[in-house]
Image (cartoon, rainbow, N blue to C red):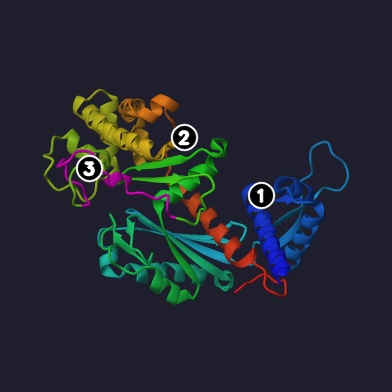
């Protein structure tokens, strides 16, 4: 009995290895797949034949290589139509819902703005259900094979992973999200923090970073950070932090979270605005800052206005000290700065780099490299996309039942 169980375990592991390799490197021939996985050609032929027989993978001709004659190699690739997933991204500005197929191809997308009263007019779960129903009305055949719904949010998740204990988005805290969506569509529904997705997406967008630990810092209406560590599964949110609400100055400027002295209170758009115009620290922060107002501050600082320069110096100092504390606990090899505030990075760079240089770990190992990526939506979506596809692979298609057929529920 044990040998049978061991054989099934190896088989499941090898199926998972084939799927994850194709997910990471894209379509390839069986010879390339054997080389990339380290499995024998016989194993690849057996596993590939099984996955193709179950319509999980399909064969397709590779593009002809320049200068080569004869039949093109046959590539193995994902069957786009075997199942679908929905990705919902919620932040302080928008709700974006995306339908994807099993190959990761975008099928359809809708987007609505988040106003201060959007989630007061109707419960958040009901609004998300409504957005997914719109995708269903437009794509009825694809939605018949829906297997998973993944939601990214800003805030602190509750212990059950059903909703948010706190969020910068008005009227989101204390509301059930996962339960009403799962009940409406009858499929697995997961909730994820944006910070971790941001970091995982950065790793996908910058493959040259290899296995370096990555810290992705979002600067905008909030300040957030996620960590992506080598070997940690993309489905976990253990790399998401509340970096923006780390205390920077005790009893300092008031933060939107209600505390005083948070990094965000100095580095988010409302913190920079407050510092630039000398608003007292104890005054409650502005509920929103128009993008044009923030860009005007960037322009003023770039053209030499002292109050604006001082405000961005304070923002850089807060972020830099926060990162230097991080370095003593879990030092990243690379830091990605993204979000609307990425356009002001050069105004904050000196203070950030000064704080990192003064950290003992940086003195010993050298400071981490820093990259600026202006559109945070791209890494967040990429992190969400790959995490969702990985979940489909692991949950439905890497596992085999007693009769050798993948569990497709």
Labels 1 and 3 touching (C-beta < 8 A): no
Q: Is residue 248 magenta?
A: yes
In terms of sequence position, does the residue under pointer 2 or pointer 3 come before the other? 3
Q: Where is residue 243 in the image (x, y as percent from the top left)?
A: 32, 45
Q: Mark 1 points at which residue?
A: 26
Farthest-out residue, front: 2
Distance (Cα) linking label 1 and label 3: 43 Å
Q: Name the residue under label 2.
A: 333
In terms of sequence position, does the residue under pointer 1 or pointer 2 come before the other? 1
SS type, badge 2: loop
Instruction: Please tell me which residue is depicted at 25% across the width and 40% down the height of the picture.
Output: 293
**Between marks 1 and 2 in the image, the one whose residue lies nearer the viewer:** 2
Instruction: Please tell me which residue is depicted at 35% across the width and 41% down the height of the picture.
Output: 340
The quadrant in which residue 217 appears is top left
Q: How crowded is mark 3: few (under 14 residues within 10 Å), some or many (20 or more)?
A: many
Farthest-out residue, top: 304
Distance (Cα) linking label 1 and label 2: 27 Å
Q: Which quadrant of the figure contains the C terminus?
A: bottom right
Q: Nearer the viewer, residue 6 or 306?
A: 6
- How many numbered tags mark residues here? 3
Q: Main secondary structure of the magenta part?
A: loop
The quadrant in which residue 9 appears is bottom right
Q: Position of residue 59 (x, y in %)?
A: 76, 58
Q: Mark 3 points at which residue?
A: 265
What is the span of residues highlighted in magenta in the rendered image?
237-257
The quadrant in which residue 77 appears is bottom right
**Between marks 2 and 3 in the image, the one whose residue lies nearer the viewer:** 2
SS type, badge 3: helix
């Amino acid at each position: 009995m044990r040998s049978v169980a061991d054989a099934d375990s190896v088989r499941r592991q090898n199926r998972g290895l084939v799927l994850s390799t194709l997910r990471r490197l894209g379509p390839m021939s069986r010879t390339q797949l054997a080389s990339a996985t380290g499995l024998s050609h016989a194993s690849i032929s057996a596993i590939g034949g099984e996955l193709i027989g179950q319509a999980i993978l399909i064969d397709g001709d590779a593009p002809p290589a320049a200068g080569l004659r004869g039949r093109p190699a046959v590539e193995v690739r994902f069957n786009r139509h075997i199942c679908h997933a929905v990705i919902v991204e919620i932040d302080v500005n928008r709700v974006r819902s995306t339908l994807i197929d099993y190959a990761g191809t975008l099928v359809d997308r809708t987007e609505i703005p988040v106003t201060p009263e959007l989630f007061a007019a109707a419960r958040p779960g009901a609004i998300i259900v409504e957005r997914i129903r719109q995708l269903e009305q437009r794509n009825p055949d694809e939605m018949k094979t829906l297997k998973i719904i993944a939601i990214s949010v800003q805030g602190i998740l509750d212990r059950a992973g059903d909703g948010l204990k706190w969020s910068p988005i008005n009227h989101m805290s204390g509301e059930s999200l996962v339960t009403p969506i799962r009940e409406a569509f009858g499929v697995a529904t997961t909730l994820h923090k944006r910070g971790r997705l941001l970091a995982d997406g950065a790793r996908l967008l910058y493959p040259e970073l290899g296995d370096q630990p990555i810290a992705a810092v979002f600067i905008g209406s909030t300040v957030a950070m996620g960590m992506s560590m080598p070997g940690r599964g993309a489905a976990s949110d253990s790399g998401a932090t509340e970096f923006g609400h780390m205390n920077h100055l005790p009893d300092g400027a008031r933060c939107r979270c209600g505390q005083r002295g948070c990094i965000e209170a100095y580095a988010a758009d409302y913190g920079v605005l407050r510092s630039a115009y000398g608003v007292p620290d104890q005054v409650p922060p502005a509920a929103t800052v128009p993008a044009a107002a923030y860009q005007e501050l960037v322009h003023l600082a770039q053209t030499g206005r002292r109050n604006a320069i001082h405000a961005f110096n304070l923002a850089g100092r807060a972020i830099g000290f926060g990162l230097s504390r991080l370095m003593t606990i879990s030092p990243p090899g690379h830091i990605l700065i993204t979000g609307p505030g990425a356009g002001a990075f050069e105004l904050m760079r000196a203070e950030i780099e000064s704080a990192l240089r003064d950290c003992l770990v940086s003195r010993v190992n050298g400071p981490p490299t820093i990259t600026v990526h202006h559109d945070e939506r791209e890494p967040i979506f990429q992190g969400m996309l790959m995490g969702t596809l990985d979940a489909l692979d692991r949950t439905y298609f890497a596992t085999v039942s007693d009769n050798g057929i993948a569990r497709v529920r």
